[in-house]
């Protein structure tokens, strides 16, 4: 199902959002519309970001479609992966640090603040509902709860920034079956430090990403360990 939807509606030669939407009433079942839209956005925003990398003078695009190779930097092949700080990684680190499970913590604090929420809803919906209601209330207690969660995530992020190998190792060890491989991967991890749940929006902010990516490549290509041995 996944391969069929992606090949038929996402990875096509002339991607048009309007054309995709028009097929919702005639071809795409309602049950998978959200998945198709998400995949379309995820794929084509990644393509645009990949083009930013390829625009750098020291980056050589691969010719045609080569599995596991998007471009070469100093003759070394790389597979670009645009991702976010994974929820499961954050969950693992929270447990390691002795932090409570986020949703459990939020439910407890919501009850203390007498904030009603749908206890039968999906965990992600409960999380969203409580956070939004706390934002709306915006009193000292709710602000403190949200600040605590944010600070704990920023602590985890700071460790990743100080030691990127930690996250890279986790991403390799926890890669899904469809992504399994041992290619040289270049991970671009997007994080909105104001709202981690909105990090996905950064994929479309090319004006913000372009100077950061090009600056990174300027420094990256100067590193001795990025140059092939003669």
Image (spheres, rainbow, N blue to C red):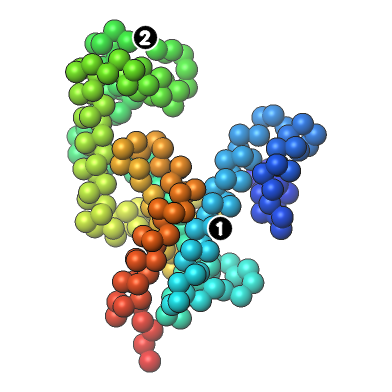
| Rendering coords of residue 22 (x, y %) | 75, 37
Element class at badge 1: helix
Q: Is residue 75 above or below residue 102?
A: below
Q: Quadrant of the C terminus?
A: bottom left
Q: Is residue 37 visible?
A: yes
Per the image, the residue denoted by label 1 is 47
In the foreground, 105 or 73 = 73
| Rendering coords of residue 171 (x, y %) | 39, 53
Q: Quadrant of the N terminus?
A: top right
In the foreground, 23 or 112 = 23
Element class at badge 2: loop
| Rendering coords of residue 97 (x, y %) | 20, 39
Q: Earlier in the sequence, mark 1 or mark 2?
A: 1
Quarter of image, res 131: top left
Is 27 on the left or on the right of 104, as rendered? right
The image's mark for residue 142 is: none
In the foreground, 191 or 102 = 191
Q: Residues within 10 Å of mark 1 (few under 14, many from 20)?
A: some
Per the image, the residue denoted by label 2 is 116
Q: Is residue 96 visible?
A: no
At horizontal 39% and vertical 49% (from top left) the residue drawn is 190
Q: Residues within 10 Å of mark 2 (few under 14, many from 20)?
A: few
Quarter of image, res 108: top left
Q: Is residue 138 above or below residue 32?
A: above
**Distance from the alpha carbon under mark 1 to that under mark 2:** 42 Å
Q: Are marks 1 and 2 in contact (CB under 8 Å)?
A: no
At horizontal 35% and vertical 42% (from top left) the residue drawn is 192
């Amino acid at each position: 199902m996944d391969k069929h939807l992606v090949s038929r509606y996402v990875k096509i030669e002339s991607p048009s959002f309007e054309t995709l939407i028009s097929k919702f009433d005639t071809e795409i079942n309602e049950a998978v519309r959200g998945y198709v839209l998400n995949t379309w956005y995820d794929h084509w925003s990644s393509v645009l970001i990949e083009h930013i990398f390829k625009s750098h003078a020291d980056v050589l695009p691969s010719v045609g479609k080569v599995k596991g190779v998007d471009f070469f930097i100093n003759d070394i092949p790389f597979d670009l992966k645009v991702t976010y700080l994974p929820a499961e990684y954050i969950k693992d680190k929270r447990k390691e640090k002795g932090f409570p499970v986020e949703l459990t913590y939020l439910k407890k604090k919501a009850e203390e603040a007498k904030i009603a929420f749908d206890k039968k809803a999906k965990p992600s919906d409960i999380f969203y509902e409580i956070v939004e209601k706390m934002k709306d209330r915006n009193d000292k207690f709710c602000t403190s709860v949200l600040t605590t969660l944010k600070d704990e995530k920023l602590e985890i992020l700071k460790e990743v920034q100080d030691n990127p190998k930690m996250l890279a190792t986790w991403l390799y060890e926890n890669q899904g079956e469809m992504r399994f491989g041992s290619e040289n991967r270049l991970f671009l991890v997007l994080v909105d430090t104001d709202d981690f749940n909105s990090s996905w929006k950064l994929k479309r902010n090319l004006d913000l990403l372009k100077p950061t990516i090009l600056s990174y490549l300027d420094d990256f290509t100067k590193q001795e360990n990025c140059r092939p041995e003669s």
